[in-house]
Image (spheres, rainbow, N blue to C red):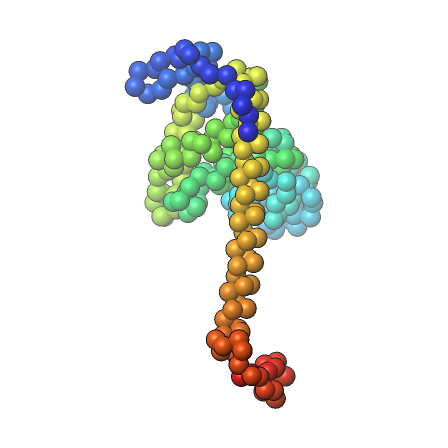
Amino acid sequence: MFTNLRSYPHTMGRGAKLALPDGWLVAPLRRLVDVRGGMTPSMARREFWDGGVPWVTPKDMKRPLISDSIDHISTTAIRETSLSLVPASAVLMVVRGMILARHVPIARTLRPATINQDMKALVARPGLLPEFLHYVLIGENLRLLALVSESGHGTRKLETALWREVELALPPADEQAAIVKYLAHAHARIDRAIAAKRKLIALLDEQKQAIIGRAVTRGLDPTAPLKESCIPWLGQVP
């Protein structure tokens, strides 16, 4: 972990809402990002669906970084519809669907892509690092979830007019970069620990199965004499 992060002896107060380090600003999302929408090209136009451009939908939003999608469209679809290409490092957010009953999926693109109508793409303006925006929105997920409402036919939606007004704390660019570096390092350590635990769990699962198998086929006495069972898969038994 980093050990040389500087402290902040002075903070900028905002009443009971927030206290910020000197040099940090507070601004609503609408002032920090450009918003792109998406749509679904006509399924009847086969030429719209024979390309390699990622078309990201909520079903792709199961990981924090998006490098590809389940479905793809062609450049013809982009030329002949209102779809626009979202740049790499845009932050994607699901704004409609039942998944919003539990959380607001957030991800960042690693390559140019398009999105469907259940998504929004947030393109960071100068002064805001896309990676920092990504982490901030993950951290503010509960605030975003509180803005989710239920539409007439039962699905959930996150109205643009509401989430655009969510205020974010914005440090200077160099500090954004330092925070991003710190969080990437911390996440990598945690991910390694999770992977090690999963490997251990898998090994313990194998051990459990082996113990059960031995107990039900050979009993509990390891010194008991054995005889052939005449069953090929069973082998010897007490």
Q: Is residue 39 visible?
A: no
Please name whichever residue, 237 or 162, is drawn nearer the observer in this view of the structure.
237
Residue positioned 52% across, 15% down in the render: 172
Residue positioned 57% across, 53% down in the render: 199
Percent x, y for residue 13? 35, 13
Q: Is residue 219 above or below residue 166?
A: below
In the displayed image of the protein, which residue is found farthest to the left?
16
Q: Is residue 119 above or below residue 226?
A: above
Quarter of the view holding residue 12: top left
Residue positioned 42% across, 31% down in the render: 140
Q: Is residue 47 left or right of residue 131?
A: right
Quadrant (top left, top right, bottom left, bottom right) of the N terminus = top right
Tag count: 0
Percent x, y for residue 162? 38, 29
Please name whichever residue, 108 or 45, is drawn nearer the observer in this view of the structure.
108
In the displayed image of the protein, which residue is found farthest to the front?
223
Q: Is residue 153 above or below residue 159?
A: below
Residue positioned 55% across, 68% down in the render: 210
In the displayed image of the protein, which residue is found farthest to the bottom?
230
Please name whichever residue, 219 or 61, is drawn nearer the observer in this view of the structure.
219
Quarter of the view holding residue 73: top right
Percent x, y for residue 173? 56, 17
